[in-house]
Amino acid sequence: MKKLFNSVLTSLKSNKKSSRQPPLPDPASAGASSSGLDLNSSAQVEAGDGISNGETEGQNTASQDSANPGSSDLESTNQESLNQKKSVILTGAVIGRTANTFYYLKVPKDDAEKELPELGIEARHDVENAAQLAYPFTLPSDIVDTKVYVVISTLSGTQLATSFYDNILAPLLKRLKSELDISETIHVERTKDARSVIDLTNTLFASNANQGIRQLIILLSGDGGIVDVLNELPTTISSNYLPPQVSLIPLGTGNALAQSSGIADETWGLSTLARGHAKALPTFIATFSSGARLLVDEARQEEELSLKDEKGHPYMRGAVVCSWGMHAGLVADSDTAEYRKFGVERFKMAAKEALYPEDGAGPHHYKAKLSLLPKGSTHWKKIERTEHAYVLTTLVSNLEKGFTISPESAPLQGSMRIVHFGPMAGDEIMQLMTKAYQGGQHISEESVSYEEVDGVRISFEGREDDARWRRICVDGKIIRLEADGWVEIRKEPRHLLSLRHLSR
Ligand SMILES: Nc1ncnc2c1ncn2[C@@H]1O[C@H](COP(=O)(O)OP(=O)(O)OP(=O)(O)O)[C@@H](O)[C@H]1O
């Protein structure tokens, strides 16, 4: 897609001087970009349009990059853009991004069969005009009689959510409201802190759900936004309970859920918003020993987990991954403002540090007892190996674009799989990870165990003195266990949340 955008823009800008801007990123991996986005390039929906902001609306600054939306150096890719014509038209609204702003490319409906260069495609980057560009983007009529919320997770990924809302989503919603004659206000919330989504779910989404109120949450975030919602949904669900429906606009770093379920496409999830349907989101429950603490504020503080089971054990819900060992370590170590600037590269940077520590000692040998409940079995199976490098339980196939950790996992299917292997040299682990980037080939390696499970249990039993090696990752959140702590992961049988998805 990147080349396609560049090529289209080349024809658009043929009368303009070559600016040799950096190439446009692949939109499906927006979070991966490290280019600085001008967050002032916002423009607000006018007052009185029925879209309300939970806080003061952004400034209507004139700093959009209208002068120069793209690169001009890829004439050679015209043929490629022709080859991709069908996907462009099928997708509908095509969205690109320069270093400074998101913008639309419009493909007029009546001209859909013509060649791309003849389409008179227009690049728009001013909001007033963009508001006119909804077609051939189909509008989701099933949102009538539904409470619609937009949640903008301002610090997700490389902080693109604000710009995406202001430049793309707000104009679309405005048009949607007028076309469908929706009188009810669409509520818009921009996160102010790490608790914003949690508080909103607690005060609004959870009680709506228990009262059986239909609601659609358009969530501009990564996996973290989903896990924040999930963990604030009621523990006791009423007989009226109606799972909230989330339409995910993947603007996080890894966007594992969106990448694995086909939501992260060249429209940044807008095709799912437009043409999707609610599907049950499979989830798991990770139950911990009582000393488990959630690490927050770049691990400077710790908190008790809010959910407790009937035995008083803390637990967390997740939809993507529960890991211990190298994966949890690199997610934890790279969750700082400094690392986050690098987008998805932060995981690779932290992985290198974990594989080749400065003291030259090699990757850590993680020590704990690991037991599995194989799918359909009632008997736990103890893994003989007591030292590990990588222990990862997942409901999804990809942890980020191209990183296929569980190639047999199908979108929203609900099967839980474990990938685990024992300690080895940094180079060997690196080779396995490289194979995961090659379509998930690591699972064919003899050193890697991969199977479908109904449960996983990790018990430290005092084998790890340093708390650093007792960190568990649940969908990007980090939970630290005590020296004799444990975690048990099971599938959640209940349908708590729906995800808008293109398949029925
Ligand atoms: N204004 C804010 N101040 C502090 N924290 C915020 C703010 N907005 C969002 N956050 C937090 O930032 C985190 C962003 O998580 P999210 O998963 O959306 O992005 P990510 O970690 O970059 O992506 P992914 O999980 O897909 O790799 C969430 O924990 C969220 O609570």
Image (spheres, rainbow, N blue to C red):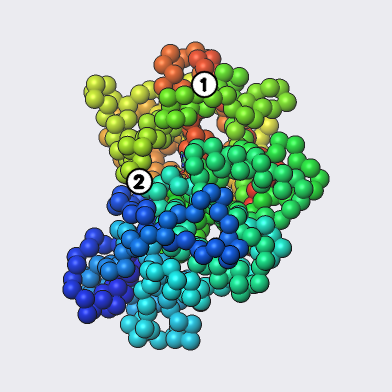
Image position of 60 (left or right of 50)? left
Per the model, the C-alpha gap separating discs 1 and 2 is: 28 Å
Q: Is residue 452 above or below residue 365?
A: below
Identify the residue at horizontal 37%, vertical 27% (top origin): 423
Q: Which residue is mark 2?
A: 343
Which image quarter is the N terminus in?
Answer: bottom left
Residue type, mark 1 in image: Leu
Q: Secondary structure at mark 1?
A: loop
Find the residue positioned furthest to the right: 239
Question: Counting other residues with Cα less than 10 Å from the Cα at mark 1, is it few (<14), some (14-19), or many (20 or more)?
Answer: many
Q: Position of residue 183 (x, y in %)?
A: 67, 66
* Residue 420 place in picture, x, y as percent: 46, 34
Residue 100's x, y, as percent?
Answer: 32, 59
Q: Which residue is mark 1?
A: 481
Q: Is residue 190 visible?
A: yes
Q: Nearer the viewer, residue 69 or 484?
A: 69
Q: Nearer the viewer, residue 68 or 400?
A: 68
